[in-house]
Structures are given as structure tokens and as C-alpha cells.
Amino acid sequence: MTIALIVGSSEERLWGLTGRERIARQLRQIGGIARVQDLNAAPDTEAVLVLRADYAYDLPTLTGLLRREGLLMDGPVPAAAHVGRAVAATAADIVQGSTLPKPAPSIPVIDAGELDAFEADLRKTEPPLLQPITAANASALENRLYGISYKGITDFITKWWWPVPAKAMVRICANGGITPNAVTCTGFALMLATCWLFHQGFYLWGLLLGWFMTYLDTVDGKLARVTVQSSRFGHWLDHGMDILHPPFWYWLWGLSLAGFEPRLGFGIEALMVFILAGYAGGRLIEGAFHGLGSVSLFAWRPFDAWFRLFTARRNPCLLLLTAGWLVNEPGLGFELVAFWTLLSSIVMLGRLALACCVRITRGPLTSWLAQEDAPHKHPRSFRTFSSTRRAYG
């Protein structure tokens, strides 16, 4: 067990949380760490984590520090420490100071730049967050926390359309005490309402509610990250809903198409098969890919990241349905979704086959974003997918 001591204070609030509140939630999320108020009264343990409350950290910073031992420096300032119990009191005194004492202590020194920059869960690469919290930079830090909550690799609507409007809703929810799970449950209700509206042929209202649901699907995850309120229930509800509902939307849209006349050569039944087989096959391919190494399919190579922008997930497919409705051809929108879903899965199957060959010949797969030379080898792709820059404005 590791014990954690939070020293100092900061009353500046970032997304509604003081420094101490944010760190306490982050430690609970990491797990296996017990907070203490006094090292002298703390139970014996091998490792001690000392953190300044007037600094902002993200989870990769804290987990990266937990994998190392030493003083974590922000330039000349000791910002945190992960040390053995024997030198914990010394480390705590140093972290509460403004500079390293002279002569330098016999504790290793870690620069924040040495911590891992690649984060597999969010498919992005950027420096871990380690900055002092002041009144002057509070707004910039909020922008940074929001920006790093975004995946680097996702669909183009989530990446380029939603960041700015979603931030406004995240701020309303954070300041109003609205929890991520409340947002997710609202989205769940909207998803069910959209199902009924599509089935009844009320396409306009279904599209409006469906798009609002996809907007809230961006909001809940970002809200959970910036306020450090991720929960197992919320995770399963959000991801379970994301996986299950899209083919039902398309299927119910298709059932509403009375008097459907094929324009691309296939009837409703065949198109339904394309959608269900293509969607299920794509998800299975993604799952199988994880067995080839520590990387997801869309984070393996730059091609896969670009393909993820437009692949047949809910948002691009909802845009195809919307386009069909706008030209008064809801059946055409359904056909486009069916063919694009099938084609996307065929491309993904080809990538899986190629990846299997690489796995056999070269060993476990890793992401191109984790490679040190990625910024120079793939400059445009790295600029596009290492983070979502529209989320930082």
C-alpha cells in the first residue's frame, strides 16, 4: 500500500474543484493509495507519495510518478515526490519548499518530460500535466484539463464539431453540480426516444434528438474526466449504450420505410443483413485486434487513425441518414449506411489480416503514436491525432 500526503493549499478552483479536492478524487480513481494527514501518525508502508495542492496534475502524471521513485520537478521547483518511507519526511519538506536545498538531497530527481507521453486509453500523445495553479493561469489550466480529456483518435464529428459546444455544457454541469451519470442517463432516455421516432417515421424529431444524444455522449465523458468523477456504473452504461444502440437506430429507420424502392440494387432485407453483419463484424474485429499487442486497431498506424475519422460508427452514419432526409430520400440514407457499414468492416478485416502477419513476424503490435520519431516520421498525422487541438481553445 502507498500512502499519500497532500501539502500546501490552493483555493483556486478548476472545473469546480480546489487542488486538494482534485487530487483526492484522482487518488481514489487510481486506487490502492491511502491519504494521510501526518506522516508521523501514518501506518508503516514502503512507499509515500507527496503532492503539492497548489499544482495541477493529470492522471498520466500521477501514474507515471508512481512507476518511478524520486522528486518530480517543475523546472527548479519540487512539485511532488514518490519515495521510500525512510526519506519521506525529507521529501515532504523539500516539496513544500520553492527550490531544491543545497547541498542536493540523495533522492533521485525526475523531470516531468521523462514521464510517458502516450496514453493508450485516449489514443493520444502529449506531455503529462504538471503546472502550478494561480489566479492568472486558472482559465488556461481549465482549457488544458478539458483538452487532455479528449481522445486524439475518434470520428471527425466528435473531434472537430463538438469540442467547443461541448465545453459550454461541461462548464454548466460542473458549476451546477450535475454528475456525469445524470448526463449519461439523459442520453439513454434520448436514445430510446430516438428509436421510437425513427420507427414511426418521424425523421426530423428523431434526428434532432439523436444528434442531441450524440452531443451529450461527448459531454458526459469530458465532464467525468475534468471533474474526476468516472465510475464503473457510468463507464458500463456509457460504453454499453454506445456499442448496442446504433444498429437498432438503423434497423428501426429501415422498418419505417414503407414502399421502399432500391436505388442501389438491394432490398430492405439485404440491407438489414449488411448493417447487422457489418456492424457486429466490425466490433468483433476491433476486439480481436487487442489480442495482437498493447494497441487498438485505430491507433496502430496513421492510416487507421485517418480511417477512424469516417469509419461507419454512429456519428458518420447518423450524418448519412441526415443527408438522406435533407434531400427527401430517407431510403437513400439507409442504403448509404448499409453499404458504408459493410465496406468499413471489409477494410477493418483487411487491416486485421495484415496485423496478424506483422504480429507473427515482428512480435506484439504497438502504436505509431508511442514511437519517439513519430513527430518527424509522420508530421501531419502526429499534429492531427496526438491530441484534439480544438478542445484547448
Image (cartoon, rainbow, N blue to C red):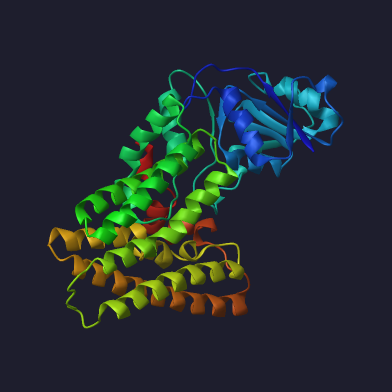
Residue 26 is situated, as x and y percent measured from the top left of the image, at 61, 35
Residue depicted at x 31% and y 60%: 316
Q: Residue furthest bottom?
A: 265
Instruction: Report the side of 115 relative to 42 (left or right).
Output: left
Instruction: Report the side of 225 relative to 109 (left or right).
Output: left
Residue 6 is situated, as x and y percent measured from the top left of the image, at 68, 24
Residue 59 is situated, as x and y percent measured from the top left of the image, at 58, 40
Residue depicted at x 77% and y 27%: 105
- Compared with 354, 187 (above or below) is above
Residue 115 is situated, as x and y percent measured from the top left of the image, at 61, 44
Instruction: Report the side of 374 relative to 308 (left or right).
Output: right
Quadrant where the C terminus sits is top left
Residue depicted at x 39% and y 30%: 171
Is residue 248 at all visible to an observer of this figure? yes
- Compared with 135, 308 (above or below) is below
Q: In which quarter of the image is residue 337?
A: bottom left
Quadrant where the N terminus sits is top right
- Compared with 189, 94 (above or below) is above
Is residue 375 at all visible to an observer of this figure? no
